[in-house]
Image (tube, helix red, strand yellow):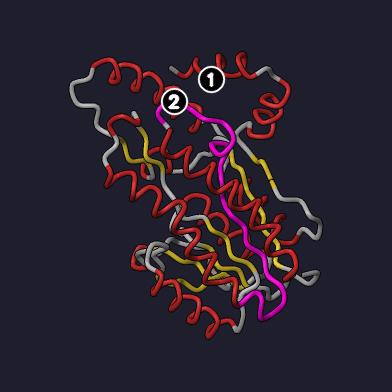
Amino acid sequence: MKEHKNKVVLITGSSSGIGKAAVNFFATKEWCVAATMRNPKKEPDYKKGSNVKVFKLDVTDRAEIEQCIKDVMNTFGKIDVVVNNAGYGLIGPLELGTVKQVKKQMDTNVIGLINVTQLIIPYFREQKEGRIINISSIAGKVALPFHSFYNATKFAVEGLSESLSYELKPFNIKVKLIEPGAIKTRFYDESLESIKVGNIKEYDNHMANSLTKIHEFGRNGSGPEEVAKAIFTAAVDQGNRLRYAVGGGAPFLLFLKRITPAPLFRSMIRKFL
């Protein structure tokens, strides 16, 4: 993939935040971009003049994924890179999460990613190359209070992606992981679903205090454009690097976790309570 012009990237969850920023960044690099989202009627204002086409895609609907891939292939003739970006966060006490809420979280963040990945691999094997870029999070390496379900999905994406990178190497298909830290997007306002704590005041007080600190941390983070740049780097990198920690203090936090004794590191995280 040394020549980047006229390459084709399919990005899930492209309506806002990191997905939207990635669409615009790839377009400025003269890539053909398949921007996918559940509701194309809410198409964002992408940069004018960019070679961007919008496609309907719900990552929990395998039939729709198959149709989307066919539509993108018919439009652009190929797909070189898939960016699995669609996802959201379920926040609150694990004790109080409903089965419906947990299933929705897992279906979107993990099963949805698996759906897209399983259905694109045959195309990549046939063309004897391809690249799968999975958007994980610092939450896939560092657990935060009241993020147990979201953490579970991102820890899963980390392990899944590392294993898959070995499986697909014989087919010249590379797998990459993007691990954003705190990023200034609407994620903290629109992409979070909170679990109701009811009348359990102990949870209520702790959760309110914790989420206030975490949301403030997020709003003071890096811009989504920084993550988009890292995604592009992963798309064109000819090396065997798997993980790309980016923005919002992610590289430093991961370094800190590596060098800090586990009990001390956990005591630092408890300050979010």
Residue type pointed to by label 2: Pro
Above-or-below relation of 77 to 161: below
- The label number, if any, that marks residue 145 in the structure image: 2
Residue that appears at 44% across and 25% down: 145
Give coordinates of residue 236: x percent, y percent. 74, 61
Residue in the foreground of this view, choosing between 159 and 197: 159
Q: Quadrant of the C terminus?
A: top left
- The label number, if any, that marks residue 62 in the structure image: none
Residue in the foreground of this view, choosing between 228 and 46: 228
Residue 261 falls in image quadrant: top right
- Range covered by the magenta-colored residues: 123-146
Q: What distance separates the C-alpha of mark 2 from that of mark 1?
A: 8 Å
Residue 258 falls in image quadrant: top right
Tag 2 and tag 1, C-beta contact below 8 Å: yes
- The label number, if any, that marks residue 269 in the structure image: 1
Give coordinates of residue 25: x percent, y percent. 62, 59
Residue that appears at 48% across and 32% down: 219
